[in-house]
Amino acid sequence: MTAPNPTSTTVIRTAARARRARSRRPLLLALEIGVPILLLAAWWFGSLNSTDPFFPPLRDIMIEFQRLWLFDKFASDVLPSVGNFLLAYLIACAAGIVLGILLGLVKPLFWILDPIVQFVRSIPAVALLPIFIATMGFGNEVRVFAIALASLFPVLISTIDGVRAAEPLLLETARVYRLTRWEQLVRIYIPSASPQIFAGALVSLQVAFIVMITSEMMGAARGIGALTLLAQGSFDVKGMWAGIVLLGVLGYLANLLFTVTRRRALAWYLGAQKAASAD
């Protein structure tokens, strides 16, 4: 009897795992879509006859949501909030990646600046907001600066760690082939650090969203956070709930967009992980 070929056996097992994964995708997609719909349906029908002033029916909340956020306040409050959030987040990611690469590659610079980075990152940006407002006023620039500062450090620290964790064998091979510093950066350092960079960017995304809301609740006259706080203070419960729903929707969409971007940018890495797990 001929002994089975180990290579053929591995290929067959990998193909079987791939088929099982593909067969589970419709079920996972149905669960991902169906569970939120079921929860919303339970909330809708469970609150239809609610007379509690603090927990109005979901139907009334959605009517207020449509009136307030899709028509009256969309251009004046929603767009500025989203714009500040996106601008500050992009600034934080760009600055964090550039500074992280520099601090990861230049050891003397890391030794000099690391104590400062650790000190500043330990101070919540929300705690510094009153100082920013007192010195720079209530303009959008203050909110963008606060959001960017708060969301800078997760991506910065992740970039430093990712760059410093580059595979020594790859670096030695690059030296043997006499790759320039720029070629090493593009071909080795950035690809090897990109999974950690995206992990830090996800944390920065969540921090930026929180600080965006908080910064608008401190003295701002416009914005989603400001109007939600105003609705709470004026006992406009339906308006308050409409603001909370909008924040949940925006947070979900931001996370969904980030996930799609990460999957496309790290397709090579995710594919390698699947291949390694299949072995």
Image (cartoon, rainbow, N blue to C red):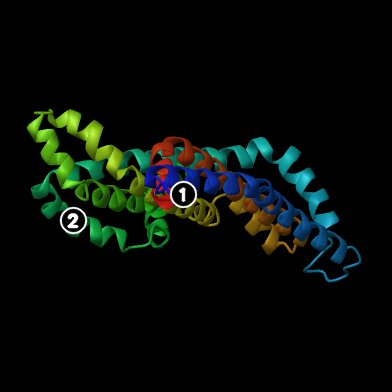
**Viewer-side residue, 261 vs 212:** 261
Decide: few, some or many residues near mark 1? Use Cα within 10 Å; few <14, some 14-19, many ≥20. Answer: many
Amino acid type, callout 1: Leu
Residue 101 in picture, x, y percent from top left: 23, 42
* N-terminal-most mark, 1 or 2: 2
Identify the residue at image location x=57%, y=44%.
Answer: 256
**SS category of the residue bearing label 1:** helix
Give the side of residue 225 with respect to residue 4, left or right: right
Q: Quadrant of residue 207?
A: bottom left
Give the side of residue 78 with respect to residue 52, left or right: left
Identify the residue at image location x=87%, y=68%.
Answer: 50
Q: Quadrant of residue 240?
A: bottom right
Residue 104 in picture, x, y percent from top left: 19, 47
Q: Which residue is mark 2?
A: 114
Identify the residue at image location x=22%, y=50%.
Answer: 165
**Viewer-side residue, 211 vs 215:** 211
How far apart marks 1 and 2 lie (CA) works out to 23 Å
**SS category of the residue bearing label 2:** helix
Q: Residue 222: tell me if it is visible.
A: no
Compared with 94, 131 (above or below) is below
Give the side of residue 44 with respect to residue 26, left or right: right
Residue 234 in picture, x, y percent from top left: 72, 61
Decide: few, some or many residues near mark 2? Use Cα within 10 Å; few <14, some 14-19, many ≥20. Answer: some
Q: Residue 90: tell me if it is visible.
A: yes
**Viewer-side residue, 11 vs 40:** 11
Residue 127 in picture, x, y percent from top left: 40, 63
Q: Which residue is mark 1?
A: 205
